[in-house]
């Protein structure tokens, strides 16, 4: 008989709640290609603390993103993928440097307000079919990287760029998944170096695998059945939720 891991033996209810959170968050992740971390992290932090929650949720999210990116690789637009990764990595490096130099109490509410304004514009008004101005991608992607480097929450700004650039739900999800597969790998390395990959981490991550497979299967099934209009509304609805959570942070 294998011994039951301590966290599972001592806190079975918390573990079951964590599995339920992972399932629900990753149904949405599989449908849209984003929002899994945004939805899973707050309740997971309440259950197991910020360090363990961030490490485990990020590892689970990396697995889902890698799975979706590989499954939908024929929708990947490589030129855009490399442009996004390049500018965001520059921004992330700058964000890490700026973390101690910028007043977060000022920056975070402004960031959340911008996200909410963009989400409401696209939810309440007819979505513009015009492409982004030629000057817009660089500041948006740099900004997404800077915010991600400072607060690990630049995904909302990235989604603004992705939603304006990729008008097809399959292309949007494939490219979003590929980007997060790459960027989350850097966060996993950082978590490993901080010593977060311990017995509790491996227990929670293993526990997440069963609901995770079911969540991706269900999310894929829903994704194939919803039309583009509903997909767009879901995307901007999640973006609004992201902005609201940032303002409350």
Image (cartoon, grey):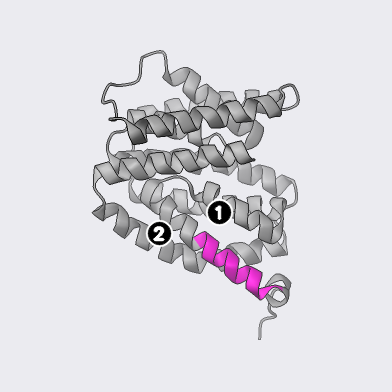
- Name the disc covering residue 11, or none: none
Tell me the magenta residue range.
11-22
Q: How many marks?
A: 2
Q: Residue furthest front?
A: 124
Reply yes or no: does residue 91 show up in magenta.
no
> Quadrant of the image for the C terminus?
top right
- Name the disc covering residue 216, or none: 2
Badge 1 density bin: few <14, some 14–19, many ≥20, Cα 10 Å? many
| Quadrant in the picture for residue 89 | top right
Badge 2 density bin: few <14, some 14–19, many ≥20, Cα 10 Å? many
Q: Judge from the rendering whether residue 38 lies leftward or rightward of residue 174; answer left or right.
A: right
Element marked by disc 2: helix
Q: Which label's residue is closer to the chain start, 1 or 2?
A: 1
Residue 40 in percent (x, y) is at 55, 54
Residue at 34% across / 28% down in the picture?
Answer: 165
Dot 1 corresponds to which residue?
40
**Main SS of residues in magenta:** helix
Residue 168 in percent (x, y) is at 27, 38
> Quadrant of the image for the N terminus?
bottom right
Which numbered mark, 1 or 2, is in the foreground of this view?
1
Reply yes or no: does residue 18 show up in magenta.
yes
Q: Nearer the viewer, residue 14 or 145?
A: 14
């Amino acid at each position: 008989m294998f011994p039951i891991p301590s966290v599972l033996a001592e806190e079975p209810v918390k573990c079951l709640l964590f599995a339920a959170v992972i399932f629900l968050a990753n149904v949405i992740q599989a449908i849209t290609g984003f929002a899994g971390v945004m939805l899973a992290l707050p309740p997971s932090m309440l259950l197991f603390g910020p360090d363990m929650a961030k490490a485990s949720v990020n590892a689970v999210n990396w697995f889902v993103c890698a799975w979706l990116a590989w499954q939908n690789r024929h929708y990947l637009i490589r030129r855009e993928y490399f442009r996004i990764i390049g500018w965001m990595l520059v921004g992330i490096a700058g964000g890490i440097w700026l973390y101690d130099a910028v007043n977060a109490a000022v920056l975070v509410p402004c960031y959340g307000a911008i996200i909410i304004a963009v989400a409401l514009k696209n939810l309440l008004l007819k979505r513009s079919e015009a492409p982004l101005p030629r000057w817009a991608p660089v500041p948006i992607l740099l900004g997404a990287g800077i915010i991600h480097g400072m607060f690990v929450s630049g995904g909302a700004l990235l989604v603004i760029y992705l939603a304006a650039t990729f008008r097809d739900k399959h292309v949007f999800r494939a490219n979003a998944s590929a980007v997060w597969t790459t960027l989350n790998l850097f966060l996993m390395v950082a978590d490993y170096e901080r010593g977060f990959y311990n017995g509790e981490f491996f227990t929670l991550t293993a526990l997440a695998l069963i609901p995770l497979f079911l969540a991706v299967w269900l999310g894929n099934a829903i994704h194939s059945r919803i039309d583009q209009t509903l997909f767009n509304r879901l995307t901007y609805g999640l973006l609004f939720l992201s902005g609201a959570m940032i303002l409350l942070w």
